[in-house]
Image: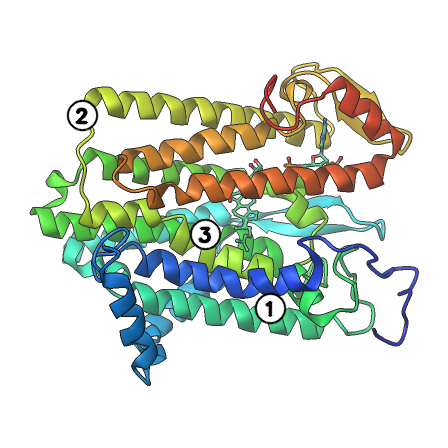
Amino acid sequence: MAKNPKGDALNPRTTTYEFLGPPGALLISIGVPVMTYALYFGCSETSGGCPPPLSLVPDRILEAVSSKDWWTGLWDTEAAVIYLAWYAFCVVAWAVLPGDWVEGVQMRTGEKKKYKINAFSTFLLALGVTSGYIWRNGPESFTFIYQKWVGFVTASLVMSVVQGLVVYIASFRQGALLALGGNSGNPIYDFYIGRELNPSIGSFDVKSFNELRPGLILWVLVNISMICEQAVRRGGLANVTDSMWLVLAFQTWYVADGLYNEPAIFTTMDITTDGFGFMLAVGDLTWVPFVYSLQARYLVFKPMELGALCATGILALNLLGYYIFRDANGEKNDFRNGRNPKNLQYFTTEKGSKLLTSGWWGRSRHPNYFGDILMALAWSLPTGFDTPITYFYVIYFSVLLIHRQRRDDENCEKKYGKDWETYKKLVPYRIIPYIY
Ligand SMILES: NC(=O)C1=CN([C@@H]2O[C@H](COP(=O)(O)OP(=O)(O)OC[C@H]3O[C@@H](n4cnc5c(N)ncnc54)[C@H](OP(=O)(O)O)[C@@H]3O)[C@@H](O)[C@H]2O)C=CC1
Ligand SMILES: CC(C)=CCC[C@@H](C)[C@H]1CC=C2C3=C(CC[C@@]21C)[C@@]1(C)CC[C@H](O)C(C)(C)[C@@H]1CC3
């Protein structure tokens, strides 16, 4: 424990733990990198399949463990330099591309932070440069992400650890505003969960930048690299399978939507409540681009033609999920910004804040999560049913959102007290209306 066990008026001590406290934080901090590599080695052609035949696994593990320098195979200097250049591109784009400055929600100091809105134009610029490059040099010129996969994962992990450490150390400076949940005094826990609420360098906000730009946009570029690799193997872009195009279209749309609606993230839990620590750094920079793209990577070495009927069914599921996700997020975002275009019902809490009780937010307490889970399923179905591994995303995501919903419920209970109990009676379902 630090000098001041109760914290101070601005930054009170965190007295309750989430994620099972320090042991859980340590386990996830080690587990996320291990899982990212495991999903590659457990599902790739280099290791023999998805999963590799069981008979191969003990030999491969023994080979790796007995080889003295197995870990050097995880490092690729060229991939690290490209990754660093990519990160620098995102920072420069943030600085030079024009964008409105928009206020976030009020913090507990009474202040509102201002954020530059140009994530979508950064995305368009990155897509333009990449398409131009592929157009000029052919799809074979952009397969290097597929070829150097492990090197890119390691580079992004190094970046996450460095950022996690830097923001943790910097959070001890005088006057830093800490997250209410990130000031426990336990270094492992605080490093993981995020000690400082909004680490920034001048007007550059590290948390929102990482959440929307270097990882989310890279996810689309990774998928494009997978398409290029499939195109090279199958004799041109015209022969890329419908399943691969569907995965690219769904996930690009999802990313484009998040970036286009950039101001909507300022009302999400990550921005308003959570600090920025290793959890968000590694989630944004490693997990999103290199785990969320598993389906596209799988389709490179297991190409699959779906046919019109299956493709239409999967498309319909994705559209339904997207409609619920966007409409629900839109209703809340409008409402939190003082607009109520659908004239939805609400009640005013004792704190003065209002809660919607009709529309999507009258059907369940997290309708947006429901839409997100339907989309996640639509992104895995194009990989068929030969392996459960490509369904990892839906399973992990459902667990994440069920846990996140409970965390948010607890936070709202603290925030709104008995008013939250009243809301829970009015809206009893957590995520899926009439079911859960
Ligand atoms: N693809 C991915 O990996 C992930 C995607 N997501 C997506 O990100 C989005 C943001 O999610 P998240 O930050 O978890 O939470 P939400 O956007 O759902 O926001 C939760 C907050 O909304 C406010 N709220 C709750 N109920 C009401 C109501 N009835 N009326 C008005 N406001 C209400 C509360 O804050 P307050 O009252 O203080 O305003 C609450 O804390 C979701 O769409 C989610 O699906 C999330 C995680 C991972
Ligand atoms: C395994 C681990 C350490 C998980 C950390 C969780 C993060 C991967 C996610 C937490 C919240 C996220 C959001 C998005 C991506 C995943 C993370 C970072 C998001 C940017 C995706 C696009 C959406 O439109 C969104 C902007 C609503 C969303 C915000 C939350």
Name the residue at 44% across, 39% down.
Answer: 394
Residue 221 in percent (x, y) is at: 33, 52
Label 1 close to label 2 by CB (< 8 Å): no
* Whether the residue under disc 3 has CB within 8 Å of ligand 2: yes
Labels 2 and 3: the sequence-earlier one: 3
Labels 1 and 3: the sequence-earlier one: 1
Above or below, 359 relative to 248? above
Residue under numbered circle 3: 288
Ligand 1: quadrant of the figure: top right
Above or below, 295 relative to 54? above
Labels 1 and 2: the sequence-earlier one: 1
Colour scheme of the rendered structure: rainbow
Q: Circle 1 — which element?
A: helix
Which quarter of the rendering shows the N terminus? bottom right
Residue under numbered circle 1: 164
Residue 283 in percent (x, y) is at: 52, 56
